Amino acid sequence: MKLIVAYIKPFKLEEVKDALKAAGVTGMSTSDVSGFGRQSGQTEVYRGAEYEVDFVPKVRVEVLVSDDLATPALAAIEHAAHTGEIGDGKVAVLPVDQVVRIRTGERGPDAL
Amino acid sequence: MSEGDVAWVLISSALVLFMTPGLALFYGGMVRSRNVLNMLLMNFFTISIVTVIWSLVGYTLAFDDGNGILGGFDHFFLRDVSSGEDLLFVMFQMTFAIITPALISGAVAERMSFKAWVLFTTLWAAVVYPIVAHWAWNGWLTDWGVLDFAGGLVVHINAGVAALAVVLLLKPRRGFGEEAIRPHSLPLTLLGTGMLWLGWFGFNAGSALAADGIAINAMVATQIGAALGALGWVAAEWMKTGAPTTLGAASGAVAGLVAITPAAGFVGPQAAFVFGLAAGVLCYLAVSLKFRYGYDDSLDVVGVHLVGGVVGSILLGVFAQASVNPAGADGLLFGNAALLGKQVVAVVAVLAFSFVATWIIAKVVDAVVGLRVDERSELEGLDITVHEERAYVLADTR
């Protein structure tokens, strides 16, 4: 089992969600986050003055998948979130020791 | 006064009082979410403080005849204010005395100690406001022929320059000029703007103290001033930065309202177009001065109220028209250059007096309780560190 964590451009969320569903993923969680990578922030204007802003808005997507779904799910995110411009984000795939479905007590891949 | 006049001034008093909660929301939306309750309370609490001060000493110092500089103490604690009409005037003027120090709160936002604010407002409302009100409405400026229909000098220039004096002593917020300290809720700011705009009809049209043609003229001029202020500000920023902003429209409407305030009952509706547009554009340009000169006028009290008040008071010397209001005068455009000169002198006098008097009061407050919160409170936010409250509780986890 794997946990896929992706940091993407907010406007790409719908496309990423649709691509994950098409790949067979049955659930996901998202949250609004802010951060920076190599692009290192951006310039914005407020009350006529320009500022360097370090943290820019991103969406974090988390998906728990079985081992065999990890590769297609990763590909789905990579493809759907891609624009080719700086700030497209990153995806990480993490190993998962255990998953429990709280309602039924199922464990492991059955809980996914 | 006729029954109609009394009814209109009663309603106007309520309308002007309604502006201070409106101002609280206007400012509250512009601060960061960790300081919004502090901002709201600075304004809301000022209503109570100034109600006490005005009843005790404010009214008598402003409107008891005394001499040209200062009223007397004959009406201390509202003594010998016997007629209903006089009491109505006490109430109507009280609402002006309340919102004027409240205006200053926007400049000192997000770092002034609440204890210091309470002490400052008390002293300022007892000393500075009544003296300037006396000068302009019952003292030497009045006798000399200076015009101030609803408080360009008394309210806006007075509060604007006082704000400048306090922020020079208070020093900037951490991060000022380095990071964009953005509004946390522009919907609140716009709601507050709407309340201010509505209340301003009581402020300006109510200042006719009668339900008559002058009140009607003032109401129309007020509407035009506000609309043109918003148009002027947004047009200027749209051309300069490429974005028409909600904050710009809100600030511009207030700038237009400020500028038309001294003139609403003395100029015709056509002139109000000039007041609103000039204030919208000039105040927009003025708010960036704080970055150039490094004074943290946090929510642009100087840029909007000082500058807008000066624009309105000076333009009044140009556009005043005695045919609009026989109690007024003709301005430069109608062959009387003297009025313009008097308006300029009045502006300079109020700027100088209010700046110096406010500086002294702020120095005293600083010596007694300290003007500023400590660094930790500023970083964590005044809501939790000073008031032990949070504005927005999304999950009841703490």
Image (cartoon, rainbow, N blue to C red):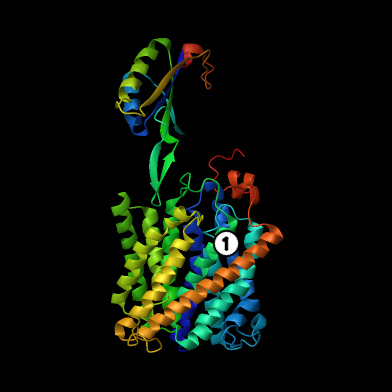
Q: Position of residue B302 (x, y in %)?
A: 47, 62
**Residue B252, located in which quarter of the rendered image?**
bottom left
Q: Residue at x 34, y 62 (%)?
A: B281
A9 or B199, which is in the foreground? A9
Work out whether B354 lies above or below B211.
above
Q: Which residue is mark 1?
A: B166
Marked residue chain, label 1: B
Vertical placement of A35 versus B194: above or below? above
- Helix, strand or loop at mark 1: helix
Q: Residue at x 58, y 81 (%)?
A: B62
Residue A36 is situated, as x and y percent measured from the top left of the image, at 44, 31
**In this view of the protein, which residue sits in the foreground, A34 or B178?**
B178
Determine the image quadrant of residue A13.
Answer: top left
Residue closest to the far right: B368
Q: Which amino acid type is marked by label 1?
A: Val
Residue B275 placement (x, y as % from top left): 34, 71
